[in-house]
Amino acid sequence: MDYYLPPQTEHVYYVDANRSKNEHTFKTDVRKAYGKVAAADTAKKNCGNARSCCGVSEKADKDYWEKLGYSDAEIEGLPEGCNMGLGCGNPQLMASLREGEVVLDLGSGGGIDVFLASKKVGPKGKVYGVDMTPEMVHKARENASKSSIENVEFLLGEIEHLPLPNNSIDAIISNCVVNLSTNKKDVFEETFRVLREGGRLAISDIVASKPLPLEMKNDSNLFCNCISGAMTVNELKNVLSEAGFTNIEIELEQDSRMFIKEWVPGSDAENYVVSAKIKAIKPRLNRNARS
């Protein structure tokens, strides 16, 4: 295995050499792409358009963020540098977070949803952000430090191998990240592991409304842009169910095709993928049942 130890963290991000060559290549490409986004934002440079899950402009597109479900008050109250135009929804709003809860954001990037969640759980709660890109974790930590936000913690790690103990999280959120994983089965098994009984999953992500052509699936650029890694609704339901989740709800946001069209112009992605609100519950064990 190859190990990457980032500054200011005791957690290790690793790449499993046993993965297929294609999976390893895509994961490496994703890490490089989002590292570039973080570096460009820090340097206040433009490396993409504001309506892209893998791009950043000099200023976030207000109309785009409103379409994703963020209010003016939410965006204006965020630490500078955490809003980079990455996402396809507003998962912390979906999660119905409560004061004192422990929350985890999968693929937390610059920390936008972590910071929004931190306000809802309050000083007695805690919000973790996990991201596999060192540049993103470093940026998020700087954002938290500059704004003196104390009930958050950003960890470097893969969402397929979460650096958190069993049964430690009340709610898991994620914004357009799970589709970037090359092993969704491991992601949902890990989320199930770290959730407490009765814990909930509330994520915004991209799903395929119909099977993608092979040439799209094998396109690394489309993978990094949250398109070719999308599962169909049935595939997603099956992998969630197999992980142990119940009360699975997947709501397609058909209007999202309008901004997906702008992610990779000319790719025809809007005819294959759509943003979705995805919810599920880790059931409570029936301890009264007779063995």
Image: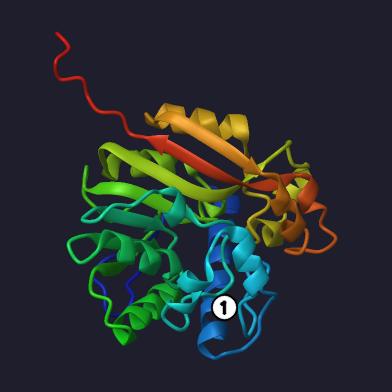
Q: Residue at label 1?
A: 36
For residue 26, above or below residue 283: below
> Front-most of 144 and 7?
144
Asked if one can make out residue 154 in the rendered structure from this viewpoint, the answer is yes
Residue lying at the far top in this picture: please name it: 290
Q: Is residue 247 left or right of residue 67?
A: left
Position of the N terminus, as image quadrant, is: bottom left
Q: Can I make out residue 18 in this image?
A: no
The answer to whether residue 40 is left or right of residue 101 is right
Q: Position of residue 234 (x, y in %)?
A: 60, 29
> Which residue sits at x=45%, y=84%?
80
Q: Nearer the viewer, residue 17 or 88?
A: 88
Q: Is residue 113 left or right of residue 181?
A: left
Q: How is the image coloured?
A: rainbow
- Report x, y in % for residue 207: 63, 43
- 170 up-or-down from 53: above or below: above
* Mark 1 closeness class: few <14, some 14–19, many ≥20 residues within 10 Å: some
Is 275 drawn above or below residue 243 in the view shown? below
What residue is rendered at 37% in x and 34% in y? 281
Q: Amino acid at mark 1?
A: Lys
Q: Quadrant of the C terminus?
A: top left
Image quadrant where residue 108 sits: bottom left
Q: Position of residue 46 (x, y in %)?
A: 65, 85
Q: Residue at x 80, y 46 (%)?
A: 271
Name the outermost residue toward the right.
266
Q: Is residue 284 above or below residue 3?
A: above
Task: Write the residue at 54% across / 59% down.
Answer: 27
Q: Secondary structure at mark 1?
A: helix
Q: Is residue 275 left or right of residue 99?
A: right
Q: Nearer the viewer, residue 188 or 280?
A: 280
Q: Based on the displayed image, in which of its 4 quarters is residue 124 positioned?
A: bottom left
